[in-house]
Image (cartoon, rainbow, N blue to C red):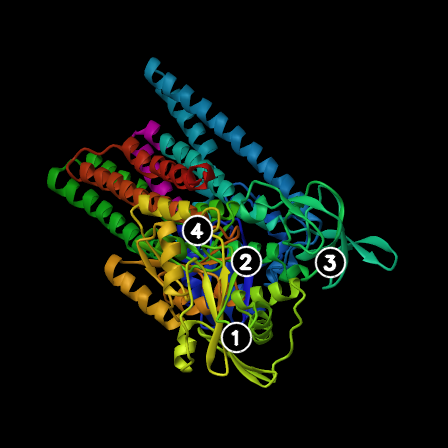
């Protein structure tokens, strides 16, 4: 059983990773994933009040103010966007006997607004204390260097330290009482108190000052990246006007049932997926698929939830309940994606476990051996203290997942849904992209463009026989022929018997005649007599054989999507090899491939043959992505290093894909690749820069040139730079 919990007052990414690791070791827990950005814990296992109590004990043993509570639900996560930082906030002051009973339920004393109010008050107090601390610090430096009043200067330094670092000291005491020693607050306290003892007053205050500024940057960056995720969640509509009897009444969106008639007024966001029942209007779909141009809809047109009506009031017939509608699926997908960790993130978490003990060990050895060998204990103890300042890996632990989190948020705004950070990571390494043709590179809206009879049957009779057989098939080509016949008023009859032959066509008996409708492979397999028939146009040829002889060809054509050629061109410009794999006849595939400019084109492929071609592409180029939309694409989507599916595709394809493109345009593949490349690049930049700076400070300290100001930069300064670098991935303008 999977259950979600909210984590209150968690303010340290490294502590979050420790909490996750410890909870995963509990016997009744199958898996636990802690999402620091969303402050959410997802646990799979046997849930009980006892488990919740044990998880809280673990969390509070690592970071004392943390509280794990049952989640308020996906719809209410936005209320927790302004969650308290653990250095500023206190728990609700109303009756909390449940804490002693280990219930840890949410306080029900109207605190949705109270929490927000407390958050605003906490922010103001944070800013005021920071300003006061800076003023006292500046005064201390002035008195220290411009006068001989050293006692006054020391008093001002101490006052500044207490104002800026009281929360660090308080957290250290709580950690010690819980038996948790080696955390960022304890290490920061030891380093700064040690600096005071050595007479390095300015360095001691400077450490806590930049630590505070770094925390503020962290809160800002996490809140901004979280907003990109929660914005999608907030697209869900809480209420809608629904026809009840003879009038429209306002009802909760969760009470809408399939078949209900909704009135969509101008400016309203659509609550559920549906079909326009009456009226005509224009809708803004940008929040769902990233398309900036409004879409005109009329009676019979399908509309996804989350879109906004911007023109005229119209009626909508619900085709899905709220929980099954597109905007809910998008919100769930984005939230779940932000919890899926890439390999790089998992590596950083493992690295962080050994980094801090190693640096602390180096610090202890430096203080002891350096003092014994040289006799200059003050210099080497000071050097050891600088090591303690940089011993916490929070910058790395936060910056890498924050980059992926930002990438997921930016992608969702552009109508691209990644299934997780690991999907972005894999796409960033892709060297080749293979597309399906029908419905992926083309519109998938086929139409009959030519009928060629062998002479024994009229065009109408050829259409009637073919249309009657194709009624059993759900293939787009078959549906287009059936639709064309009905538009022409051709009467279709039910076959006496029929069978759909995957990748080939249909075999049926109509009016006592044995009829085959399909591609050339089917005709040859059934040993049909094939006369010479002209084939001069690009398209899909459906051969119609009656009683063992081909009587004609029905040519069905499809148009390329508007961004197909440009997408292929853009991918090639990025150094990505392109391919098109299709079940369509090789001649049609070759013609479409020439129009697109794809590097590799293969036609007449069955699903397993597409997978074989994909493997060949992987051997030639490396990691490969496949983009498709049909049921028959599911195996190759699953077999690719990265699978991409068009939103208009089958449910099976959407389930098998690692990324879903809501606009169903090939250009979205290019955008997704750009987001992945940038996210991966930012992650590597963060790792290299952080390790290089920290290594430089360690080397300088070991060779006898310690500098606590440089150590402060290596810790808090580097953290700020990495965080700012990570949220660059949120800039959607760079991907278009």
Query: Magenta segment, which residues?
Result: 182-204
- Which secondary structure dominates the residues rendered in magenta? helix
Tell me which residue sits at (40%, 60%) in the image: 588
Reading the image, the residue beneath label 3 is: 317
Q: Where is residue 730 shown, x and y percent of the image?
A: 46, 41
Tell me which residue sits at (38%, 45%) in the image: 674
Q: Earlier in the sequence, mark 4 or mark 3?
A: 4
Tell me which residue sits at (55%, 65%) in the image: 3
Reading the image, the residue beneath label 1 is: 456
Reading the image, the residue beneath label 2 is: 445
Q: Earlier in the sequence, mark 1 or mark 4?
A: 4
| In the foreground, 346 or 102 | 346
* Separation of residues labelled 3 and 1 (CA atoms): 47 Å
| In the foreground, 508 or 157 | 508
* Separation of residues labelled 2 and 3 (CA atoms): 24 Å
Regarding residue 393, the answer to whether it shows in the image is: no
* Separation of residues labelled 4 and 3 (CA atoms): 58 Å
| In the foreground, 638 or 55 | 638
Q: How many marks?
A: 4
Furthest-left residue in view?
373
Reading the image, the residue beneath label 4 is: 175
């Amino acid at each position: 059983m999977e259950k979600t919990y909210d984590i209150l007052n968690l303010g340290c990414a490294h502590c979050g990773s420790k909490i996750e690791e410890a909870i995963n070791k509990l016997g009744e827990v199958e898996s636990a994933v802690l999402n620091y950005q969303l402050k959410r814990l997802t646990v799979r296992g046997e849930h009980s009040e006892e488990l919740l109590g044990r998880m809280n004990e673990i969390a509070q043993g690592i970071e004392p103010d943390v509280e794990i509570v049952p989640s308020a639900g996906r719809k209410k996560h936005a209320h927790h966007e302004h969650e308290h930082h653990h250095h500023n906030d206190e728990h609700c002051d109303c009756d909390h006997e449940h804490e002693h009973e280990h219930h840890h339920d949410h306080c029900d004393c109207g605190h949705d607004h109270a929490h927000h109010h407390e958050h605003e008050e906490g922010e103001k107090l944070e800013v005021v204390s920071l300003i006061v601390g800076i003023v006292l610090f500046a005064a201390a430096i002035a008195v220290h260097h411009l006068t001989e009043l050293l006692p006054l200067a020391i008093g001002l330094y101490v006052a500044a330290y207490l104002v800026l670092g009281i929360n660090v000291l308080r957290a250290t005491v709580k950690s010690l009482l819980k038996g948790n020693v080696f955390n960022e607050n304890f290490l920061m306290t030891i380093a700064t108190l040690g600096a005071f003892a050595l007479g390095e007053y300015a360095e001691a205050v400077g450490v806590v000052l930049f630590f505070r500024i770094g925390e503020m940057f962290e809160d800002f960056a996490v809140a901004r990246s979280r907003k990109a995720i929660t914005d999608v969640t907030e697209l869900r509509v809480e209420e809608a006007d629904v026809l009840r009897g003879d009038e429209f009444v306002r009802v909760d969106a969760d009470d809408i049932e399939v078949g209900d008639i909704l009135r969509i007024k101008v400016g309203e966001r659509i609550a559920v997926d549906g079909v326009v029942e009456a009226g005509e209007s224009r809708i803004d779909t940008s929040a769902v698929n990233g398309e900036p141009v409004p879409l005109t809809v009329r009676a019979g047109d399908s509309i996804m939830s989350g879109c906004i009506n911007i023109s005229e009031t119209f009626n909508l017939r619900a085709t899905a309940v709220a929980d099954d509608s597109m905007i809910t699926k998008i919100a769930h997908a984005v939230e779940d994606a932000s919890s899926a960790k890439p390999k790089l993130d998992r590596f950083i978490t493992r690295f962080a476990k050994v980094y801090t003990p190693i640096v602390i060990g180096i610090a202890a050895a430096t203080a002891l051996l350096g003092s014994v060998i040289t006799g200059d204990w003050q210099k080497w103890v000071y050097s050891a203290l600088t090591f303690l300042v940089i011993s916490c890996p929070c910058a790395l632990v936060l910056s890498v997942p924050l980059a992926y989190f930002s990438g997921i948020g930016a992608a969702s705004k552009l109508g691209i849904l990644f299934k997780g950070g690991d999907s972005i990571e894999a796409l960033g390494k892709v060297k080749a992209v293979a597309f399906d043709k029908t419905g992926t590179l083309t519109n998938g809206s086929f139409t009959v463009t030519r009928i060629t009879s062998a002479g024994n049957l009229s065009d109408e009779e050829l259409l009637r026989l073919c249309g009657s057989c194709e009624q059993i098939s759900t293939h787009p080509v078959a549906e287009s022929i059936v639709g064309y016949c009905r538009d022409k008023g051709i009467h279709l009859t039910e076959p006496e018997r029929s069978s759909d032959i995957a990748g080939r066509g249909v075999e049926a008996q109509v009016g006592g005649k044995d009829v085959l409708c399909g591609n050339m492979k089917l005709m040859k397999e059934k040993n049909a007599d094939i006369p010479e028939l002209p084939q001069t146009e690009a398209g899909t040829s459906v051969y119609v054989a009656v009683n063992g002889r081909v009587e004609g060809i029905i040519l069905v054509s499809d148009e390329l999507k508007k961004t197909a050629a440009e997408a292929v061109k853009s991918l090639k410009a990025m150094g990505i090899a392109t391919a098109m794999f299709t079940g369509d006849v090789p001649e049609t595939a070759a013609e479409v491939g020439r129009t697109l400019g794809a590097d590799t084109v293969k036609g007449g492929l069955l699903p397993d043959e597409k997978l074989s071609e994909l493997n060949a592409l992987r051997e030639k180029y490396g990691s490969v992505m496949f983009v498709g939309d049909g049921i028959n694409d599911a195996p190759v989507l699953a077999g690719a290093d990265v699978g991409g599916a068009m939103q208009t595709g089958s449910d099976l394809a959407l389930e098998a894909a690692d990324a879903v493109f809501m606009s169903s345009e090939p250009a979205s593949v290019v955008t997704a690749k750009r987001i992945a490349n940038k996210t991966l690049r930012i992650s590597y930049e963060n790792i290299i820069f952080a390790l290089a700076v920290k290594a430089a400070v360690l080397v300088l300290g070991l060779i006898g040139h310690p500098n606590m100001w440089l150590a402060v930069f290596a810790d808090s300064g580097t953290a700020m730079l990495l965080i700012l670098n990570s949220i660059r991935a949120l800039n959607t303008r760079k991907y278009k």
